[in-house]
Image (cartoon, coloured by chain):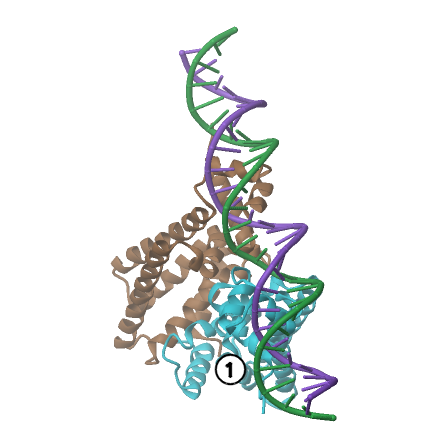
Chain colours: A cyan, B brown, C purple, D green
Amino acid sequence: MKTTSRKAEIIAEASQLFKEKGYSAVTVRDIAQAMGIKAASLYNHIESKQEILSVLILDLAKAFTTGMERIQKLKNSPLQKIEKLIELHIDITVNQSEALAALNNDWMHMSEGDVLDFVAMRETYEENFRNIIKDGIALGQIQPRHPEVILFSILSTLRTLYLWYQKRGKLDVNVLKRDMVAVLLRGIV
Amino acid sequence: MKTTSRKAEIIAEASQLFKEKGYSAVTVRDIAQAMGIKAASLYNHIESKQEILSVLILDLAKAFTTGMERIQKLKNSPLQKIEKLIELHIDITVNQSEALAALNNDWMHMSEGDVLDFVAMRETYEENFRNIIKDGIALGQIQPRHPEVILFSILSTLRTLYLWYQKRGKLDVNVLKRDMVAVLLRGIV
DNA sequence: AAATCAAACTAACAAACGTTAGTTTTGTAT
DNA sequence: ATACAAAACTAACGTTTGTTAGTTTGATTT
């Protein structure tokens, strides 16, 4: 009863190394050693080192896109949608912090075509997020500040959450969601 | 009348490349080409590729430490000190965005000793920031939420500001400061 | 017992890496 | 003109890189 394919194991092991040292500083021999095999053996399962990176990043990008599409369809207010988006990021962070590191730091090392796909998905995601913020401002639910500053402030916090979660003793996810929503939406004063 | 040393020019050029591709993906031949010289010629001015990275990161870390020490001595309230810290980060971002990228992403590629120095400086900085937040909570100036969540939320936004500043048409610095202070301290609702 | 198949292995490759040694060029001061 | 120092050059080095080719191992199926 094999539950995970060998390829998936390799990708999981590689993602941890990528998170620690970055894609370019990790060699295929590092990955092989972490698996307890020789470097050449990896190529029975993967096409290239770059393929590992692309699988990691593009799968995760799709998860964000899917989540955004689901939330957009809800009959909620803009503010409630932003709460859902914060929860989406936290859920993904908790389950995929290694892939998140690669997505944040190493996307430019994918093949040219994959980079184009990724950047397009990213821009669409940000555009959708920005529109929800603008809707909230139009409805008077959100303060009339530059939407770009609001978007950036929320997204940068959520995107680097993976660096803190785990270092600080893996806080309870529900407590984290509640506190993050409070701080990001209502400030600290 | 030489105004900048050749070494400083190399470090400036390298920092731009590091920002785009990361330290490990940039070769000394890349740096040399950007300077219009051969790779070996670099070594008339620098000791190693790693030295460039360490100069970039440790100089910047010292700027943060110095700024923190100056602000701590002020006779201001905790909230006013946090405002000053936000302004400190923005000033540094505007003037040194390339070095900030290296500090955020490539500090682990310095020599072992330099990494230890850097991590110690970083922890001290965060500890001082956290204490200011705690003072604000004790005084009732800041809402009684987990200080760690507040610290993380503010710092992660400020640390990744370099990714947005410039992409979004180089906003006016004073406008940026005002908006960032408003969003980070008073939220968006 | 024979055949199959996934997954490991050894050996080697050409290219790219950071760095060194020694030499030549270039501009400035004597 | 000569001397000097800064800064470039050519040539090469030993390693490490990602990857390929062909072979062996070990378990499962026929």
Q: Tell me the quadrant of the picture where the C terminus of chain A can be found.
A: bottom left
Q: Residue at x 29, y 68 (%)?
A: B132
Could you say which quadrant of the image residue A77 lies in?
A: bottom right
Pick the residue in front: A179 or B34: B34
Residue B38, given in percent of the width and then of the height, sits at 58, 37
Pick the residue in front: D10 or B172: D10
Q: Residue at x 64, y 78 (%)?
A: A62
Pick the residue in front: B167 or A20: A20
Tag 1: residue type? Asn
Q: Is residue A145 left or right of residue B84?
A: right
Badge 1 density bin: few <14, some 14–19, many ≥20, Cα 10 Å:
few
Quick check: can you spot residue A144? no
Q: Is residue B68 above or below residue C17?
A: below
Instruction: Give the chain letter at badge 1.
Output: A
Quick check: can you spot residue A37? yes
Q: Residue at x 47, y 47 (%)?
A: B49
Residue D29, given in percent of the width and then of the height, sits at 69, 92
Q: Residue at x 52, y 70 (%)?
A: A101
Residue B55, given in percent of the width and then of the height, sits at 41, 48
Q: Tell me the quadrant of the picture where the N terminus of chain A can be found.
A: bottom right
Q: Is residue B30 above or below residue B176?
A: above
Tally of marks: 1
Pick the residue in front: A16 or B60: A16
Which residue, given by chain and number where applicable, does mark 1 sit on?
A: A95
The secondary structure type at the circle numbered 1 is: helix
